[in-house]
Amino acid sequence: METMTYSTQDIWTWWLAAYLYFGGLGAATLSITFLTDMYCRANPRLVLWGAISGVGMLALSSLVLFGHLLHHVAVIYVINPMVLFQEPQAWIAWGTQFILWMMVWGTLYAVPYMRESPAFLRLPLLGTLLQTRFAIWLSGCCQKRRRIVGWLATINGIGTAVYTGLVIQSFPAVALWHNPGVPLLFTVSAFSTAFAYLLIVLYLGKPSEHHELLTRRYELFDLILIATELVILFSFFNYTLSGSESGYRSAQLLWHDMGWLVGFMGLGLIVPFLLNLKGVVKGWSTSIPTIAASVLVLIGGYLLRHYFMYTGVYAYPW
Amino acid sequence: MTRYAMVIDLNTCVGCNACMAACAMENQTPVWKNKWRTYVHDKEIGMAEQVRRRFFPRLCNHCSNPPCMTVCPTGATYQRADGIVMIDPERCMGCRACAMACPYDARYEVSYHDIKEGRAFYGEEELQRDSPGMDKCSFCAHRVDKGLKPACVETCVGSARLFGDLDDPNDPVAQVVASGAAQPLMAYLGTRPNVYYINDMKRRG
């Protein structure tokens, strides 16, 4: 048809961007924490902080989505694990299961550490629960099968991070979303923001025995991930410049917007990249630049999803 | 097998919007917030004395490869053997992923508030829907099952809408589609739409 109408959408807006952001951040935080604990150095404080905040972020993400549903009772169909056999083609079904099981395995992994923590045992309700016979048995089981529990959590965490990209990739009409780069970009961003978050936790918390080793490694990983994100975004820039009118219109919206250019690309990626690069190569005499870089990465992570949701363009032939 | 499809002739649509009204009454759509199962776009085309109006009816394309069904996590969106894409309102949790996936802007939401409004608008006894969720055209499946045509086709004064079976070689719809005179929208997306349009541009030059 000769006529066209171009339109952005107002169906999945900032709340969905928040859902994708906290889902990816929480899942990646848990995965990194458990992998560090299993293969780098056992670190109870990191596990406790990572598990509590990670599960908290996943719960917040789920609540945001749940709150915006039109028919709350029908959510029972996606909570049921059988949904993976009934609707295996729907990424939201996978994502819901990943998030739910991530919270379960994430909590179980942290239970033995909670039982060893005097602060947790002193907590009013949780402290009593942790000292019950069931909690002692559960903690023993999780301790004995620590790596199995850790890997189950990690697999669900990676699944959640990839899902946050796959869910918007499954919308075929919008070129910005419907391409293989989106899951990759969102996964890299989820892990980058999680490293940034854990760096803040490490720097603001009481320094542990392996503080220096961990922070150096996390800074290096974050630097690599930010660089990867920049490369992916550069390829997105080229991809959207031609090929489809939908993609081109998205490019016009994105690359002419100061919030995207200065806010996300500049302050959310390039500035933290340079700060981390200096930290990794020469080191900083204070932790402030690294903390500042991490805060910027966290803000940038949200902005990425926010702008992605708002600049997807539908091309209607009427 | 039966495979239902619709052909819309843009040459004969006069933009009377009777299809919208008939559909709204038949399917109790939330007209109070300007949401319709079928909508007729009114667009000016051309410049200066060449300018003219084009009326463009749109609705769910009942795709053979429907992206709205692929993304639906609860199975609320399903396809009948005759190709009609339906929504089970009881199963729909209203995540709106289907509306995001639809390239034809065919879906809209029905909230708790809309159901309350609907009771006042269509009548407490008459309102068929009692749970919120997503909604869209069903090719008037309840009418089709009784051997009737969809309400929009039945009411169209310009006979701009034809409804029929693509798998029946004697059906006029199948013949028009087979002739190539009617084309689907955005076929390159791979959705295999079953609503076809006869273009008005070539004839009007």
Image: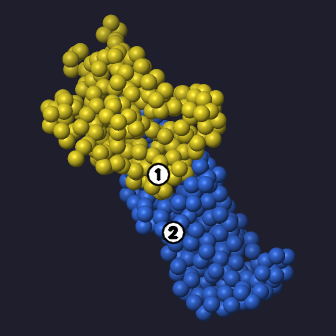
Chain colours: A blue, B yellow
Q: Residue at x 58, y 68 (%)?
A: A100
Residue A244 against residue A225 in the figure, above or below: above
Residue A294 against residue B111 in the figure, above or below: below
Instruction: Place residue A286 in its image quadrant.
Output: bottom right
Q: On the rendered structure, is A255 left or right of A120?
A: left
- How far apart are labels 2 and 1 at the CA level? 17 Å
**Spot occupied by residue A196 in the image (x, y as percentages of width and height):** 62, 66
Q: Amino acid at mark 2?
A: Pro
**Spot occupied by residue B26 in the image (x, y as percentages of width and height):** 46, 29
Q: Residue at x 38, y 39 (%)?
A: B141
Closest to the observer: A212 or B156?
Answer: B156
Q: Label 2, on which residue?
A: A81
Closest to the observer: A267 or B63?
Answer: B63
Q: Residue at x 45, y 55 (%)?
A: B75
Q: On the rendered structure, is A175 left or right of B31?
A: left
Quadrant assignment for the C terminus of chain A: top left
Q: Label 1, on which residue?
A: B76
Under tag 1, what secondary structure? loop
Residue B46 against residue B172 in the figure, above or below: above
Q: Residue at x 37, y 45 (%)?
A: B85
Subunit of label 2: A
How many numbered discs sit on the rendered protein?
A: 2
Q: Amino acid at mark 1?
A: Ala
Q: Which mark is residue A213?
A: none
Closest to the observer: A293 or A307?
Answer: A307
Instruction: Place residue A42 in its image quadrant.
Output: bottom right
Closest to the observer: A250 or B106?
Answer: B106
**Spot occupied by residue A254 in the image (x, y as percentages of width and height):** 49, 43
